[in-house]
Image (cartoon, helix red, strand yellow):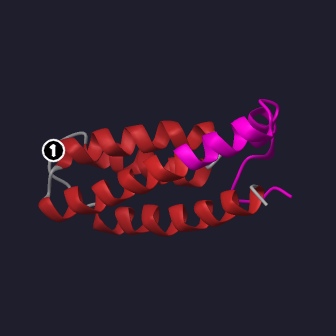
């Protein structure tokens, strides 16, 4: 059963790769995305808008690849907000963190 947090067509395409490959890709995404979310939190605290933009862009792309469109949307907002330099994106980073927690739970459900 696909969670409303994830695009069913995107997940179906990933499942077509095979169960072992799907499991491996999900684990890889979850590990890398968790590190990126943590990096976003750190860079927001430091006010490092250039690093925020790069991390948000990277997380956006990988999230789109798993059909986590809402998460990708928040990342896009961070990228846009930081494009011109310093921006207070703490609230958006909190949204990303909360949405990633929901996506992580949905993907773990997909593995069962």
Q: Main secondary structure of the magenta part?
A: helix
Which residue is tagged 1?
A: 85
Q: Quick check: 65 above or below 91?
A: above
Viewer can see residue 88? no
**Residue 6 lies within the magenta run:** yes
Q: Is residue 87 left or right of residue 7?
A: left
- The residue positioned 15% from the left and 44% from the top of the image is 85
**Residue 110 lies within the magenta run:** no
Q: Residues within 10 Å of mark 1 (few under 14, many from 20)?
A: few
- Report the residue that reaches farthest toward the front: 20
Q: Which residues are magenta?
A: 1-28
Front in this rendered view, residue 49 or 97: 97
Q: Is residue 14 left or right of residue 48?
A: right
Measuring from the top left, give residue 103's x and y in whole percent.
Answer: 61, 60
Viewer can see residue 76? yes
Measuring from the top left, give residue 12's x and y in whole percent.
Answer: 81, 39
Per the image, label 1 sits on a secondary structure element best described as loop
- The residue positioned 62% from the left and 46% from the top of the image is 26
- The residue positioned 58% from the left and 49% from the top of the image is 27
Q: Is residue 26 left or right of residue 81?
A: right
Task: Identify the image quadrant of the C terminus.
Answer: bottom right
Measuring from the top left, give residue 60's x and y in whole percent.
Answer: 47, 42
């Amino acid at each position: 059963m696909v969670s409303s947090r994830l695009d069913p067509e995107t997940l179906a395409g990933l499942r077509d790769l095979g169960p072992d490959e799907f499991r491996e890709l999900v684990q890889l995404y979850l590990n890398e995305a968790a590190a990126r979310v943590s990096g976003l939190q750190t860079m927001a605290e430091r006010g490092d808008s250039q690093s925020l933009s790069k991390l948000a862009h990277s997380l956006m792309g990988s999230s789109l690849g798993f059909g986590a469109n809402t998460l990708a949307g928040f990342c896009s907002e961070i990228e846009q907000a930081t494009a011109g330099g310093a921006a207070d994106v703490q609230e958006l980073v909190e949204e990303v963190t909360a949405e990633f927690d929901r996506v992580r739970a949905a993907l773990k459900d997909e593995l069962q």
